[in-house]
Image (tube, coloured by chain):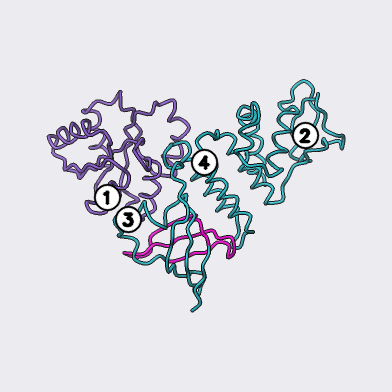
Amino acid sequence: MANVLFIEPDKGLGGTYVQAFEHAGHTVHMAATAEEAIMTVDEQRPDVVVMELQLPGHNGVAFLHEFRSYNDWSDIPVIINTYITPAKMDQARAALKTDLGVTVIMYKPRTTLQRLISTVNEQVRA
Amino acid sequence: MKQLVTPAIILSRTDYGEADRILTMLTPEYGKVTLIAKGVRRIKSKLAGGIELFSVSEITFIKGRGGVGTLVSTRLTKHYSRVVGELDRTMLGYDIIKRLHKATEDEPEPAYFQLLQQAFEALDNTQIPLEIIKVWFFTQLLQLGGHTPNLRLDSQGRPLASDQRYEFSFDSMAFTTSPDYGHFNASHIKLLRLCFGGNTPHVLSRIESSEELASQLLPLVQSLQTRN
C-alpha cells in the first residue's frame, strides 16, 4: 500500500487519520507544520501528501511552493483537505491546481474518512 | 575571484544536482543574478535561513562564466513573515514575484528591487487591503515600463472634470467621456493619480473608500498591464 504524509496541525484529528489509514493498510507519517513536512518528505519520500492549508507559521501555500521547487518531488500527488470553505477556495483553486499541482481539493467538514481513504487510493493508483 | 556583496531578493529557486540549488535573485546593483547555492539541498529546514522567499538578504557571490555565479554566503536582513501567515497574502506575494520576474530583463533598474521590497512591506502589514496592494503594484509596474496613462486630459485633450463619468480608452491611454455608462469618476482617477504619484500602499489605504475604489479599478490596471 502507500506511504502517506499528512500535514495536519490538529493532533487529535491527526491521530484519527493514523488509525484509519494504518487500518486500511497504509504507512502514515504526520507533520504539524510546513517545516516539519519538508523534512519528512526529504526523509520518507511519500507516495501522496494529504494536507490542511491553514498551518501555523508558514501556511500551506508556502509549503507547496517550496515542495514543488524540487524536481524529484514534482510528481507526488497532493490532496488538500481543508477547513477553508469551497466558496473561499474558488479564487485559489485554479492557481493551486495549475501552478502547484494540487490534484484534489476537499472540504474537511464534509469529508468522511472512507472518502478520504478512497481518494488517496485513487491518487496512488493514478 | 572578486567577491561581490549586495542586498538581494529571491525570485525563483530550482534544483541543481543532488545537493545544490540554483537561485535567481534580484539585486539593486547587479540586476538579476543566477547563482548556485552549494550544499543547501539537504539542510534540515528549507523554509528557513538566508535563502527564503519574502526576505531581503545580504549576499556575497562570485560572478561566473556563462551567467551562473556562485553564492558564497547569505545573511538574512529582513524576513516578511506575515506574508506567509495568511493564504491570500501568500498567493498574492507569489503572484507579485512571478509577474516582476516576467516583466524584468536581466539588468532591470534598481527601482524594481525597491518595488519588490515595498510590495513585501505592504503584504507584511495585514491592515492594508490586498486590493489596494494589487492596484498599487500594477500601476508601479506600468510606470516602470513607461506605460503611464494620461490622468490629466481625456482622450479628446480636455482636462478631466470632477463631475464627469468616464470609460478608459486603451488606444489613447486616456479616459474618455461616457456620461451614461462610465465606470469611473473623479475618485477613481484621484486614486490612480496617487498610485502613479509614488504613494505607498499604506498611505493609499488611509484614503476614504480606497479599498472599494481599488477593487473597481483592478480590472482596468490588470488589463493595462497585460496589454503592455
Whether B169 is among the magenta residues is no
Q: Which residue is denoted by mark 4 in the rendering?
A: B123
Image quadrant of residue B219?
top right
Shown colour of chain B: cyan
Vertical position of residue B212 compared to residue B86: above or below = above
Magenta residues, as a range? B7-36
Q: Which residue is denoted by mark 1 in the rendering?
A: A41
Q: Position of residue B84 (x, y in %)?
A: 43, 42
- For the residues labelled 2 and 3, the Cα–Cα distance comes to 50 Å
Outermost residue toward the top in this view:
B180
Q: Which residue is denoted by mark 2 in the rendering?
A: B175
Shown colour of chain A: purple
- For the residues labelled 2 and 1, the Cα–Cα distance comes to 53 Å
User: In front: B170, or A13?
Assistant: A13
Task: State the residue at coordinates (18%, 41%).
Answer: A28
Query: Is disc 4 placed on a helix, strand or loop?
Result: helix
Q: Earlier in the sequence, mark 4 or mark 2?
A: 4
Amino acid type at circle 3 is Asp
Q: Which residue is denoted by mark 3 in the rendering?
A: A72
Read off the chain for label 3.
A
Is residue A63 rendered to the left or right of residue A28?
right
3 and 4 marks in contact (CB < 8 Å)? no
